[in-house]
Amino acid sequence: MSGPSVEVRLLFVDDGAYHHETVRIPRDALDRYERLIDCVREDPEVLKRVYVDVDRLCAASVADED
């Protein structure tokens, strides 16, 4: 992945069970969307790097960075 990236925590639900995954996405992708979850679901650069089960994705948040 070229350029700066940001760590994003994704929350998925499957038959009532929740689980988290943490991924890294290009930082500039965030600027192209008003909502982070839309960026994760729709951005071509993100989708090239990360498989996202959009039917089970229910939340996305930027992970704390020190």
Image: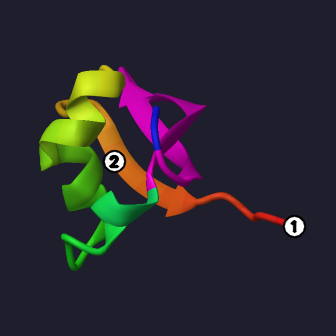
Q: Is residue 25 magenta?
A: yes
Which numbered tag is attached to residue 66? 1
- Residue at x-position 31% and y-position 39%: 57
Q: Is residue 53 visible?
A: no
What sort of colour scheme is used for the picture? rainbow
| x, y percent for residue 10 | 48, 43
Instruction: Name the residue tied to disc 2.
Output: 58
In depth, the one of 38 and 20 nearer the eye is 38
Which of discs 1 and 2 lies nearer the camera? The answer is: 1
* Chief SS of the magenta region: strand
- Residue farthest to the right, as pictured: 66
Marks 1 and 2, Cα distance to the nearest angstrom? 26 Å
| x, y percent for residue 17 | 50, 26
Q: Is residue 58 magenta?
A: no
In depth, the one of 50 and 13 nearer the eye is 50
In depth, the one of 36 and 28 nearer the eye is 28
Direction from residue 63 to residue 66 in the image, left or right: right
Amino acid type, residue under disc 2 in the picture: Cys
- Residue at x-position 28% and y-position 47%: 40
Question: Closer to the N terminus: mark 1 or mark 2?
Answer: 2
Badge 2: how crowded within 10 Å, few (<14), some, or many (20+)? few
| x, y percent for residue 9 | 57, 47
| x, y percent for residue 38 | 19, 59
- Residue farthest to the front, as pictured: 2
Q: Is residue 57 visible?
A: yes
Region in magenta: 3-26
- Residue at x-position 66% and y-position 58%: 63
